[in-house]
Amino acid sequence: MATREKNIFAELRGEHIDAVVLTNASEPNVDLSFFYATGIVNGIFERCFAIIRPRGVEVISSDLEALSAEQAGLKTTVFRTGKDREGLLRRKLRGCSRIGVNANEVTHANYKFIKMCAGGSRLVDVSNAISKARMIKDREEVALISRACRIVSRAAETIPDVVEEDMKETEAAAELNYMMMKLGASGPAFATNASFGSTTAEPHYVPSSRRLKRGQLALFDFGASYRRYVSDLTRTFVCGRPDRRQREMYETVLEAQLAAIDEIRAGVHGRDVDHAAREVVDSSKFKGKFIHSTGHGLGLSVHDPGAISPNVDMVLREGMVLTVEPGIYVKGFGGVRIEDDVLITRTGCRILTSAPKEFLTI
Amino acid sequence: MATREKNIFAELRGEHIDAVVLTNASEPNVDLSFFYATGIVNGIFERCFAIIRPRGVEVISSDLEALSAEQAGLKTTVFRTGKDREGLLRRKLRGCSRIGVNANEVTHANYKFIKMCAGGSRLVDVSNAISKARMIKDREEVALISRACRIVSRAAETIPDVVEEDMKETEAAAELNYMMMKLGASGPAFATNASFGSTTAEPHYVPSSRRLKRGQLALFDFGASYRRYVSDLTRTFVCGRPDRRQREMYETVLEAQLAAIDEIRAGVHGRDVDHAAREVVDSSKFKGKFIHSTGHGLGLSVHDPGAISPNVDMVLREGMVLTVEPGIYVKGFGGVRIEDDVLITRTGCRILTSAPKEFLTI
């Protein structure tokens, strides 16, 4: 991971930062940038520190995770007690006059702990630099994300065969997770959303024992995790014959998604890509029913830095990986969303997910 | 969830807190206490706020999650833009002189945002009070955790039938996740750890394409998530006949676990429970090979507040749910861990997980 620290410090030119300190609280409050900078695949590293300097990364690890850190080939110092831990951090930060912290991903309590150990040194919020570094994926990251995308795509292709009328949402989610893991995923990237009928109108729904009935929309939003990197894909189906409203919703969303993808290339504003999708929805009878942004960054996290949003000022750059996922949500009736993951290129994008996008029947 | 705010404010007596503000950054940096206080089952609620007052909870929600919040029966105000969001929080905090924040689970950036919106009000770290409230599970929480424990136990019972020689770690993990979801889990509680051979010595290992060979230890550490609440169970097997060292490791760990469970009841120090387990390991030939604490809290998070640890000063109280999981780890050879989840009672504990604990063969 020797280039990762260079990527971070390249964004910090002129800031005179001596070292950046990253740390994890208890799960789920871990700093994924810790894993970006260290390249560590196994472990959670609660209460551990990564100290990033322009010329290398070292880890202060608990006993529990020491083996995982060493296997990643990192210089590792191990603590056993809280006193050890504090003493080690103080020693490593000695002589630094400006220390970077990642305010977006460190808890306030850990920020205060670092401040205490930093003595008189100045803490500087470097979360923007870290986000910028993480937004541009390196070759290894692209390979891992592509693998996660291939896995989720293969799993999505099985939906019309595997999901059937009267199946529970949790059962359908079970089938998809199983398929992804048989294909090599280390797990689902997030709680697989399989929703049937009116619950398809809740974008972040968690599956329940609701059963699929004829005539209902069935929405699947899921992703694979592969060596910490993730994919994120959504496809919407109908059980039996779609009615006119369902068909109109689907066609509008698909048109919006294709319009957005068409707009994408390095140098374009995310806002303009969002506009391309939103314009399609808002000039249809479903005006105002597209209630979220068109896309978000993807990498170590399902919501990685970066967004294709009306409210975010971001220019697309080569090497970014983003989702493209317009949707239409009609309360009490249902929702349609179509989501793919794309790698931004100089002239357009490479679509990393590949399941069919026709309006298919279960 | 009407009693949750009372539980929190009961721990804040004399602190004169007008309101507690909880908020979520991007996944995974969400504050699970947001879901404790609100009882919301669906949604991620990134960038949303829960405002907890002694007499009730209200939510400031993005468009995206508004439906999930309303369905939980909560007073909900919706924002569309960042400016809306800031204005709403400012308005809701007006007139408060002391505002509680959860420093253990809020990011430093969000802490600064709340501070800005709080005007001249004083922010007070109330994370201890929140942890204490969350440590004692109410009846509804115990029911959900028990359900998650039943699911993982049933899945664990299938291991000797489902896992076989030459199977990949990821395939075994796939089978366990599938079984849990077929049994009603909304997903795995964390990345299911199936490790074979020497990787069993890494407590937080992530499964890879390694295949199970005759003579190897096979360790499974996994849990179910059920309506946001989780279970956490570990069982260790051997493929074929165990050798003497494996048998000694297993017997020592089992004896240590039973010694710890025997010690547990309300009023006992966690440190003493840890000591009971550690003494068994440290008086065996595996002295010093038990490299983590005996247990941790369990609830919304796999690592909930509370620990059975030599380094944590905590008295067990009725209603706590904790793991009991001693282990022995021999680098290059393998590890054994046996983990159950227990509910502390006045006179002892109720063991919520129920898979067999004999040294079984795959």
Image (cartoon, coloured by chain):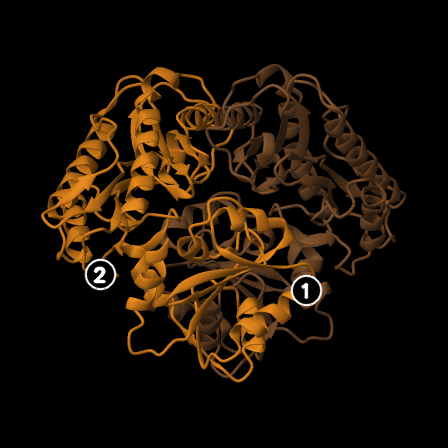
Chain colours: A brown, B orange
A81 with respect to B313 (left or right): right
Dot 1: chain letter: B
Residue at horizontal 12 percent and vertical 46 percent from the top? B348
**In-front residue for pair B75/A22:** B75
A2 with respect to B250 (left or right): right
Labelled disc at residue B314: 2
Kind of element beneath mark 1: helix
Q: Which residue is mark 1?
A: B82
Mark 1–mark 2 Cα distance, whole angstroms, equals 42 Å
Identify the image quadrant of residue A213.
top right
Q: Amino acid at mark 2?
A: Met
**In-front residue for pair B348/A171:** A171
| Percent position of residue A199, x then y | 57, 36
Location of residue A94 with respect to A317 vertically, above or below: below
Dot 2: chain letter: B
Identify the image quadrant of residue B142.
top left
Question: Which label's residue is closer to the chain start, 1 or 2?
Answer: 1
